[in-house]
Image: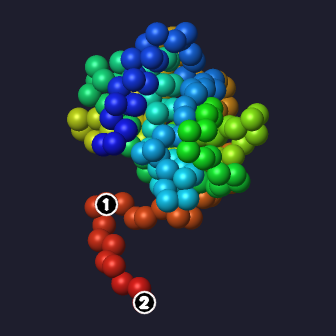
Amino acid sequence: MHLILRTLLILIKARRRPPASLWEPTEITLRAMLTDVDLLRHINNGQYFSLFDLGRYDLMVRSGFWDACRRRGWYAVVQAEQVTFRRSVNLWQRFRLATRIIGVDDRCFYIEHRVVVGGEIAVRAYVAGRLIGPQGPVPMEEILNLAAEIGDPAPENFEVPEKLRRWREDFALPSSRRAVPHDWD
């Protein structure tokens, strides 16, 4: 909730920025704010996931996909994410957040986020996401059809790199329809 004003600002600014393809990288420039940092005055590891949302919002709005999904009652959810840190981003430091969809499989679309400082990657994350509609998860075929309808068909052979597919499968929890008791043994 603490990012609500920044989120609204990104949504407004994205509508004024040049259109972008859903399948090409986009970038936004941000600054590490007081609400982003921890006691060590660098962006808190957990805060990065909220900042990555901003990159996805920018990409979806600029591509026209945001409005098309909203008309259908679809919204995005994260199914899995992983992040790797290389350098800290400190209080008040400016950085670029680069976002791109890197592939799809039968269930998820995969997004790469990069936090770039001085032309170098400081943080990289991978996110596996899905779209949910009024009847539940939206099939990937419908998602790709919608992208084509708005004039942005997916590239040929837009498959997820095997290492990412394995990562999601290896660390995924069972379906929410199955019991997963908490037991350390």
Q: Amino acid at mark 1?
A: Ser
Q: CA distance from mark 2 to mark 1?
A: 21 Å
Q: Amino acid at mark 2?
A: Asp
Dot placed on the residue nearer the N-terminal end, 2 or 1: 1
Judging from the image, what secondary structure is the residue with disc 2 in? Answer: loop
State the residue in front, 125 or 69: 125
Which labelled disc corresponds to residue 185?
2
Q: Please tell me whether residue 137 is drawn above or below residue 151 in the rendered image.
A: below
Is the residue marked by circle 2 packed among few (<14), some (14-19), or many (20+) residues within 10 Å? few
Provide the residue designation for mark 1.
176
**Residue displayed at 56% across by 44% down:** 91
Report whether 40 appears left or right of 3: right
Expressed as whole percent of the image width and height from the top left, the position of residue 20 reads 56, 16
Expressed as whole percent of the image width and height from the top left, the position of residue 70 reads 30, 23
Is the residue marked by circle 1 packed among few (<14), some (14-19), or many (20+) residues within 10 Å? few
Q: Quadrant of residue 155?
A: top right
Front label number (2 vs 1): 2
How many numbered marks does the figure carry? Answer: 2
Q: Image quadrant for the C terminus? A: bottom left
Q: Image quadrant for the N terminus? A: top left
**Residue displayed at 62% across by 46% down:** 89
Q: Is residue 34 visible?
A: yes
